[in-house]
Image (cartoon, helix red, strand yellow):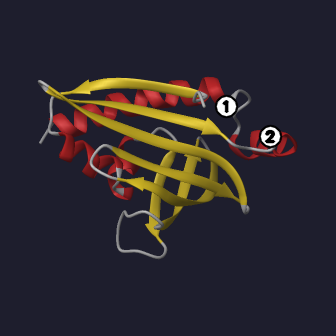
Amino acid sequence: MTPDASAHIDVAAPSQRVFELVSSLRGMGECAEEYASGTWLNAAGPRVGARFRGINRRGWRVWPTTSTVTDCSATRFAFEVKSLGLAVSRWQYDIEETADGCRVTESTWDRRPGWYVPLTRLATGVGNRAVTNQRNIEATLQRLKRAAESV
């Protein structure tokens, strides 16, 4: 299934470093556009089946989510997001080795039921989630590159 938003960036850093950043709740809080922070709920860190509570922020709007890690390997970190118990999205980071480091692809799929979309527009202030996520992904990847390459 084609993602609703996706972009990639080449990073001059080891793929392990990038994986550590994208699978770190703190690391992604520093890189992501809307995700601000999170807490592991049933694990000490990332692993398949681990759940985390995320806090997202856009301007004055703040909303919580609960996510479950579905993929956790050197080449992919992904999680399914729920809000108020409803599936709302999937986020995925694919990491490919390159001659100069790695290429990171961030993708997302909107999983919200149609009737839930107007409610999330009010909560997040986002009218067109696909366009906003595309911009967010591009900004996040730029920050991720800077963070990974600065070590």
Left or right of residue 92: residue 64: right
**Residue behind mark 2:** 117
Residue at x-position 11% and y-position 42%: 151
- Mark 1 is surrounded, within 10 Å at the Cα level, by few (under 14), some (14 to 19) or many (20 or more) other residues, namely some
**Residue behind mark 1:** 129
Question: In which image quadrant can residue 142 be found?
Answer: top left
- Quarter placement of the N terminus: top right
* Amino acid bearing label 2: Val
State which tag comes first along the sequence, 1 or 2: 2
Q: Secondary structure at mark 2?
A: helix
Question: In which image quadrant can residue 150 be found?
Answer: top left
Instruction: Tell me the tag on residue 77.
Output: none
Picture coordinates of residue 51 (x, y %)?
50, 67
Q: Nearer the viewer, residue 78 or 57?
A: 78
Is residue 49 placed above or below 24 in the rendered structure? below
Q: Secondary structure at mark 1?
A: helix
Residue at x-position 40% and y-position 50%: 29
Q: Are marks 1 and 2 in contact (CB under 8 Å)?
A: yes
Question: In which image quadrant can residue 72 be found?
Answer: bottom left
Q: Nearer the viewer, residue 60 or 150?
A: 150
Picture coordinates of residue 34 (x, y %)?
52, 42
Residue at x-position 21% and y-position 39%: 148
